[in-house]
Image (spheres, rainbow, N blue to C red):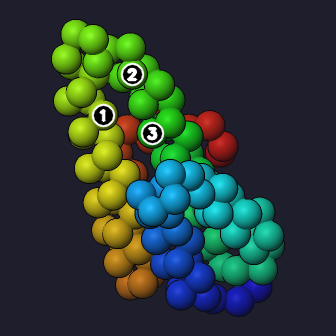
């Protein structure tokens, strides 16, 4: 098993594809995690954190959509957008220093 902080950093940053393509922020990290979890040190735990965070953001967004009609959903979606932009960047920086990621509001789907 090899240490590859650059690939882990790239996996965290690949979540930002959602802002460019509208999707991909879950698919690309999922593919990297599945294909590299046996080969790269820490990829399994980092990949699980990323996928759990992306699935959590998706569920929270689905919950917020009907709440748009009572305005609280708008604030929820804005907050989710900020979280899904800021935390992949912060965790990419953490990963480059060998630290563990911290994703807020992340539900544990994959353990």
- Residue 104 position, x and y percent, is 35, 45
Asked if the residue at tag 1 contacts the one at tag 2, i.e. Cβ–Cβ closer than 8 Å, the answer is yes
> Residue at left 24%, top 39%?
78
The answer for how far apart the CA atoms under marks 1 and 3 are is: 10 Å
Q: Is residue 25 visible?
A: no
| Relative depth, front residue between 65 and 88 | 65
* Number of other residues with Cα within 10 Å of mark 2, as a class: few under 14, some 14 to 19, many 20 or more: some
* Number of other residues with Cα within 10 Å of mark 1, as a class: few under 14, some 14 to 19, many 20 or more: many
Identify the secondary structure beneath mark 2.
Answer: helix
**The disc label shown at residue 65, or none:** 2
Q: Is residue 74 left or right of residue 97?
A: left
> Residue at left 37%, top 38%?
105
Residue 100: name its quadrant: bottom left
* Number of other residues with Cα within 10 Å of mark 3, as a class: few under 14, some 14 to 19, many 20 or more: many
Mark nearer the N terminus (2 vs 1)? 2
The answer for how far apart the CA atoms under marks 2 and 1 are is: 8 Å
Mark nearer the N terminus (1 vs 3)? 3
């Amino acid at each position: 098993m090899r240490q590859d902080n650059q690939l882990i950093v790239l996996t965290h940053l690949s979540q930002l594809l959602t802002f460019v393509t509208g999707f991909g922020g879950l698919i690309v990290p999922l593919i990297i995690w599945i294909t590299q979890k046996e080969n790269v040190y820490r990829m399994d735990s980092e990949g699980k954190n990323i996928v759990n965070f992306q699935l959590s953001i998706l569920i929270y967004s689905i919950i917020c959509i009907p709440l748009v009609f009572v305005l609280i959903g708008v604030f929820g979606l804005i907050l989710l957008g900020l979280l899904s932009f800021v935390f992949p960047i912060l965790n990419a920086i953490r990963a480059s220093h060998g630290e563990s990621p911290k994703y807020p509001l992340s539900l544990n789907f994959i353990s």
